Image (cartoon, rainbow, N blue to C red):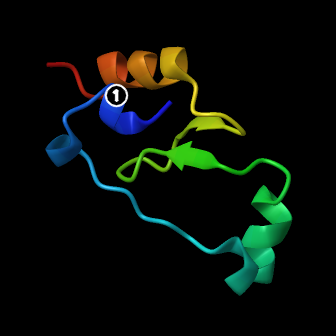
Amino acid sequence: MQLSELLNPDSFSINLIDIDSDPEIQREYALRIPVLTDADSGKIICEQLLDRRSILKHLEIEHPL
């Protein structure tokens, strides 16, 4: 699944972080990637898989239309 299947591609942005560039980030996330977080709150939306239900739930709660 891709985020563009759920949302208009112009309605979100993605910041990719290379975990190999930072040992602390690598220790924290190595076994959990990919990790999708809300850029404003830092809240983890889903990890290991892009979970459609978790993404939609987050959008309803954090960013209602």
Q: Relative to 49, is 12 on the left or the right?
A: left
Image coords of residue 27 (percent x, y): 85, 67
The residue under label 1 is 5
Q: Is residue 5 above or below residue 13?
A: above
Which residue is the extreme one toward the bottom? 21
29, 41: nearer the viewer:
29
Which quadrant holds residue 65? top left
Residue 13 at what x, y percent from top left?
29, 54
Q: Nearer the viewer, residue 24 or 17?
A: 17
Give the amino acid at mark 1: Glu
Q: Residue at x 80, y 61 (%)?
A: 28
Q: Quadrant of residue 25?
A: bottom right
The residue under the point 21% across, 20% down is 64
Residue at (39, 36) in percent of width and height = 3
Label 1: how many residues lie within 10 Å, few (<14), some (14-19) or many (20+)? few
Query: Secondary structure beneath disc 1?
Result: helix
Asked whether 53 or 8 is in front, the reply is 8
